[in-house]
Image (spheres, coloured by chain):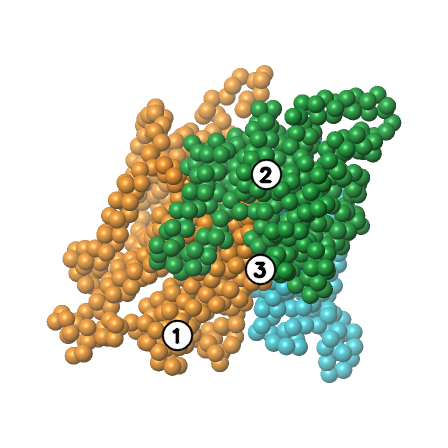
Chain colours: A cyan, B green, C orange
Amino acid sequence: MENFLQQLINGLTLGSIYGLIAIGYTMVFGIIGMVNFAHGDVFMLSAFIALLVFLILTQLVGLAYPPLAFLIVLLAAMAFTGLWSWAIERVAYRPLRGSFRLAPLISAIGMSILLSNFVQVAQGPRNKTVPPMFTDLIRLTDGPLSVTLSYKQILIMAVTAALLLGFWFLVQKTALGRAQRACSQDRKMAALLGVDVDRTISLTFVIGAALAAVAGALYILYYGVVNFSDGFTPGVKAFTAAVLGGIGSLPGAVIGGLLIGLIETFWAAYFSSDYKDVAAFSVLAVTLVFMPSGLLGRPEVEKV
Amino acid sequence: MSRWLDDPLLSVEGLTMRFGGLTAVSDFHMRVGRGDITALIGPNGAGKTTVFNCITGFYKPTQGRLALAHADAASTHDVDALTRSGRRFASMGGRDLFLLERMADYEIAARARVARTFQNIRLFAGMTVLENLIVAQHNALMRASGLTFFGLLNTPGHQRAEAAAVARAVGWLERINLIGRADDPAGALPYGDQRRLEIARAMCVDPVLLCLDEPAAGLNPRESAQLTALLRSIRDHDGVSVLLIEHDMSVVMQVSDHVVVLDYGRKIADGAPQEVREDPRVIAAYLGVDDEAEVIAAESEIARLAGEAP
Amino acid sequence: MAAPTAPPRSRLQTALGDAGFAALVTFGLSFPLLAFRTEQDMQNRLVVEPRWSWSLAAVLAIFCARLLAGLIQDWRARALAIPGALVAIYGGSLALGPSFSAGALTACAGLVLLALAFPLDARLRQAPAPAARSEGSDRSRLFALGGVLALFLFPFVMLTLLGPAGSLKWINNYGVQILIYVMLGWGLNIVVGLAGLLDLGYVAFYAVGAYSYALLSTTFGISFWLCLPLAGILAAFWGVILGFPVLRLRGDYLAIVTMAFGEIIRIVLINWTDFSNGYAGISSIPRVTFFGVPFTANEDGFAALFGLEFTPIHRTIFLYFLILCLALLTNAVTLRLRRLPIGRAWEALREDEIACRSLGVNTVNTKLTAFALGAMFGGFAGAFFAVRQNFVSPESFTFIESATILAIVVLGGMGSQVGVALAAVAMIGGTEILRELDFLKHIFGGSFDPAQYRMLIFGLAMVVMMIWKPRGLISTRAPSIFLKHKRAVAGSLVREGHG
């Protein structure tokens, strides 16, 4: 029972991170029908940006108060990663919009390879570790297998929840959200009705990247280590989350993320940690084959 | 006179199709006479294409039986026996009998020999006109090429089969006046030519029943006249029964032997063109009953069109 | 576009404005990632240090590239000018820093390229557009024959020119390596290019082929010549098994599921150590023999049998011919299949699946045969890989491999055999040439490691080539049958498939 509770906490923490990345996949797929293969690497990039900004703040600027440092890191990572994503869309995807359908996919795969190797060249191939922050624990139960909830975990879940609320407001209540929904329904019609399609798509990429940047900052906070090759696997898992929740559905992406986090954690705890990635990939395959519209997505009817 | 009652090729019984909560077609009965041109008409959204998609297997009907008999009409007894047997098709008393609602779409084309065209033309745009007609003869060629193995060795049998397929395609291209464009990509043809090519492609499947979904849509009057002639020659020369959905009343009244009218997923009229034309329910369905003047105008229009027909 | 009231800006002004904006964005992008570096100090603590030079270099490079792209219209002149400018900047920075002479020389070379680009652009702009080339089937057949002949002569030419030791690299790293990818590209072309089914897990079948030979030969001692067909059959079997559940899926979804399958197979190979020996892989796989005669220095070896002096190049040349024959077999079968009903059904499936079903084509069988045949050729290539390396491990079958093969097919122009071969030469040959950048160490000093730029440039090339030619190098489609004239179908009419 203690173990179960502990794994539940760990799984939800991990799931929050996946959920934040998954939103980027689901939004971009919803609006232009493309799997943004480089999104996982954008997440990795953001973790590096967060790491560097944190080190700059603590070592070069001399900011000693952790909560303020964390807040600045979060905002800076969102801003710089958003800029990266904007530039990627502008350079690698926009010229291919409306062209041959496979071209953006290959371009995105190329971008993914480019980004991870760029970080390798710029920051070196080794693991980068940061000193642990917010290390305090709360003991929920006593005993040989005590259940603990760390401040870090609380912070991750709280930040995720707060951001999701803000984000939900953004898509549901603002003109931007309306423009996004219009573009995902019918891009040509939206353009005819005066929606600036290019700008809406750019903003979608920026918002998705900003949420991935939060995930990146939380990732580096939680694990304290990042490597240039860390984009692919979390990226695929987050994509799995988006598919599981029903691609195009924002609450679905979050629920999918939490589920994937839980599946992975429990699989590793109760079966075998060697095969935890197989569990995630199998969920992906099984969902797509048997339930392609996911948990909350709209089913697609074949038009004859 | 009413061949569809005496010798039906296809009988649709109690066809119902629901999409979620929406009932597109409910308890629909119709018969397609062997050697007839049958028109299925009705206002937009009446469920005509849904009936088509059920007949050709692209939709699985919620309920209903669609029995198709090659050669001559199946007895009710045979159809019931096949239904009870749980099989999809069988040879009953010397006749090949098919229950279309149980068969997959490609089986309906390949075995039951029901070919179709689409409302929004579905040619293989990047393949040439000739290739389109060769693909339509896929199953015959597949058998001749020994499921590819003889074909890899290029055996004489396979060569003969391919030559025959090309000859058949050439024959059709001559009939639809497209022989000069055999080596052009199908997607580069003008709209009217694409419509005719799609019909020729369906005919290359060697069907007993040809289903055409709005074949005259988007055609100019000259092309419509060509289409009418083509449909008659398919009926009279090839002996293939035709079932068509059409909005162009002049085409319907000119070529059909039998007209079935559908409105809100239900059949409202069924009979020879003259009978249907005069049916007040049909006029009401097409024009609404409120405006007396419009009804009269429409009636005179229909009468005028029917008068043009020989 | 100028506002109607303002006077129209000159091209230079527009280019400068664009370049300035691009430079600003680049500065933002480079801010933490290039402008700072981290290093571990004595206490294993990560320490951050500024490194503004890198950021500055990136800003300068992007500014120049964008400016030149704005000033020069023709892409060929751009391709000359932009690298020229970058080389000049690099040389200039070197001349100021570590090595004046080498830097100045590099800078001059770059400036010469840059200077040449402007007159070239002016001339190309004046020259009339080249007339559309006629698609002479005789000429293309002659070209293909010449190409095959050149491929057969290639190792002997290299051997004569460079001797056994010098030619090894060319025959092995370029010849064999490129041909493996040509074969993989042709195999995947059946699935993606002809049938229009997007497969991002093709490496799984390559792995099945490689492990089939590795395990069958080391466990049961079965010879390569028997294992080769077995590897193909096993891979085809896996193609059907993995193909079956994904029949209903389309487009990107299909790509993602096949990628997941590829990764699952790799993870299983890593973790099921009893079966595959895990990360350590399977080593000492029997080497290839000349139909039973080993390539050894012994009396019963190949060299002794044919009265030649023993050299290891014999085996390499044999491997070269082996993969050449396997690749040509793939090509011949594919070309033949395109003219058979099954091949036409694949292409029709790519064009319109619903129309196919309305014509009685069993799309399930059609898709599965495409998966199976594509997988079979992948399996052959895998068995060849194992016998060439004498060692297989899961490391060789990562997602990057699948992505590379798919990129070759898409870049080649889907369905075009010649295009796929050209793309394989460009992508694989290109990355192999990047391995030769070691000479740069002499210029930039020993700490400079050109190898790490290889994949960076590879990824960049993928993006650039897609933007340059989204439909691939050869986008036209040759009809499989014709009545009077064989005319290529324009790429814009050919569909890419939704599966």
Residue in front for this viewpoint, C331 or C183: C331
Q: Residue at x 26, y 62 (%)?
A: C321
Q: Mark 1, residues whose alpha carbon is within 10 Å: few (<14), some, or many (≥20)?
A: many
- Whole-angstrom CA distance, mark 3 to mark 1, is 29 Å
Find numbered disc 1 in the image and state the secondary structure of the residue it sits on. helix
* Chain letter of the residue beneath label 2 in the structure image: B
Which residue in the structure is indicated by mark 1? C214
Side of C389 relative to B42 (left or right): left
From this view, report whether residue B301 is shown above or below residue A294.
Answer: above
**Number of numbered discs overlaid on the protein picture:** 3
* Chain letter of the residue beneath label 3 in the structure image: C
Q: Which of the 4 image quadrants contains residue C325?
A: bottom left
Q: Position of residue C481 (x, y in %)?
A: 39, 44
Q: Residue furthest front?
A: B1
Which residue in the structure is indicated by mark 3? C246
Which residue in the structure is indicated by mark 2? B235
